[in-house]
Amino acid sequence: MRPMLCVLLVMATTACGPRELRITMNSDNNSGQTGFAVLVDRGNKGMTVTVETSAPDFNEKPQNAHIHEGDCGEVGMIRATLTPLDKLPASPDRYASTTEVGGVNFAMLSNGQWIINVHDARDNGIYVSCGEIPNP
């Protein structure tokens, strides 16, 4: 009986897989750029962050993105720099990036308010898309 219990326990813990959060990226500063972000927990290794938005209509330069403390109304300190969003070859009307983030994990996100911001490629001080990260 005991070996069967161990097998069931292993099956139950491996079937769960990594935790994910999907957040909505809303247009900021009348940019019209909307989309989503997916955060995948990698435990003490951090997390994987994928951000995808509609493409800006003003140029084709990559757009910087960060994880900040705060909320979309009051942006705080940068906590992680994400890979700049660039045009998707298969979908030229979409911009995206995926980043392995080492310094931020789901346990940290449980404490406080956090956001993902995408910046205007022409002026890094202007935010074009923002998503508030819910506590996991």
Image (cartoon, rainbow, N blue to C red):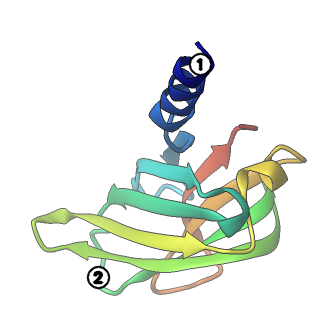
Find disc 1 in the rendering and name its residue.
5
User: Relative to the observer, which residue lies in front, 68 or 14?
Assistant: 14
Of the numbered discs in the image, which one, if any, rests on residue 130?
Answer: none
Mark 2 and mark 1: Cα distance apart in space: 59 Å
Q: Is residue 134 visible?
A: yes
Q: Secondary structure at mark 2?
A: loop
Quick check: 60 left or right of 112?
left
Residue sitting at the far top:
1
Q: Residue at x 71, y 37 (%)?
A: 136
Quick check: 114 left or right of 24?
right
Find disc 2 in the rendering and name its residue.
59
User: Relative to the observer, which residue lies in front, 63 or 125?
Assistant: 63
The amino acid type of the residue labelled 1 equals Leu
Q: Residue at x 51, y 46 (%)?
A: 26
Residue 20 at x, y = what percent? 53, 42
Q: Residue at x 48, y 80 (%)?
A: 83
Quick one: label 2, few (<14), some, or many (20+) residues within 10 Å? few
Residue 118 at x, y = what percent? 54, 68
Q: Is residue 22 above or below residue 73?
A: above
Q: Residue at x 40, y 56 (%)?
A: 33
Q: Is residue 18 above or below residue 1?
A: below
Q: Is residue 72 visible?
A: no
Residue 35 at x, y = what percent? 39, 49
Q: Secondary structure at mark 1?
A: helix
